[in-house]
Image (spheres, rainbow, N blue to C red):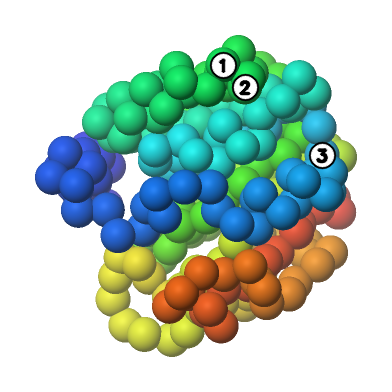
Amino acid sequence: MNLCFLAAAWEKCWAERLTPWDLGGVTPLIQHLVSQDQLPQGRCLVPGCGSGYDVLALASPSRHVVGLDISETALERAKELASKNTTTQKYVEFKAVDFFSYSEPKPFDLIFDYTFFCALEPSLRPAWAKKMAELLARDGELLTLMYPVGDHEGGPPYAASPKAYEAVLHPCGLHALYLEDNKFSIGARKGREILGRWKKTTPRI
């Protein structure tokens, strides 16, 4: 897959507002987990952050959040949203960068993936898993909201399943401690989302 072509395609979608994956607000599951204080603190990463709703929801004095996207238009919207949120804007950072070439000297304590894995061609999934393992701290957590769960052909979004995640994450030393249907799904996504919480069980690769 030509990543430059991929970046141009996503930028076109955002520029033309063809973004059906964008909920127009915070992911309900994230809102719940934050309100219940059920997520790690420290450094957090949201790849494919889009409009930045979840980035801002996750941010707090105890959690600095980096949002990545390859679309400049998406990040313009995210930064505009952040500028209006004086409570958490100081704890967020947005970067227009390709996830696969992104690196940080300090790993992340939490990574949240939603509608990012399913946007990638399946051939990129092993590289996705390897990068996740590289960016995640030894005791960190990878939070995946798997969508759309099913077996349809083609995409994006490409079909997702726990087995598809396990196939690429297990070789990188990440294993699920928790898999459950997402009871906070909205509308047509109900019954098509599974929450996975992953931890490293082998030394960092």
Dot in front, 3 or 1: 1
Q: Which residue is mark 2?
A: 88
Of tags 2 and 3, the one toward the viewer is 2
Q: In the rendered view, would you say 191 is above or below 185?
A: below
Q: Which mark is residue 86?
A: 1
Q: Are marks 2 and 1 in contact (CB under 8 Å)?
A: no
Real-space Cα separation, disc 2 to disc 3, in angstroms: 17 Å
Report the residue at 38% width, 70% height from top. Answer: 158
Label 1 sits on what residue type? Thr
> Residue at position x 84%, y 64% from top?
177
Counting from the top left corner in percent of width and height, residue 69 is at 39, 35
**Residue in the picture at 73% in, 75% down:** 180
Q: Position of residue 79 (x, y in %)?
A: 40, 22
Comparing labels 2 and 1, the label whose residue is closer to the camera: 1
10 Å crowding of disc 3: few (<14), some (14-19), many (20+): some
* Image quarter of residue 11: top left
Residue that badge 3 annotates: 40
Which secondary structure lies at badge 2? Answer: loop
| Disc number for residue 166 | none
Q: Is residue 167 visible?
A: no
The three-letter amino acid code for the residue at tag 2 is Thr
Lower sequence index among marks 3 and 1: 3
- Given the image, on which type of amino acid does mark 3 rest? Pro
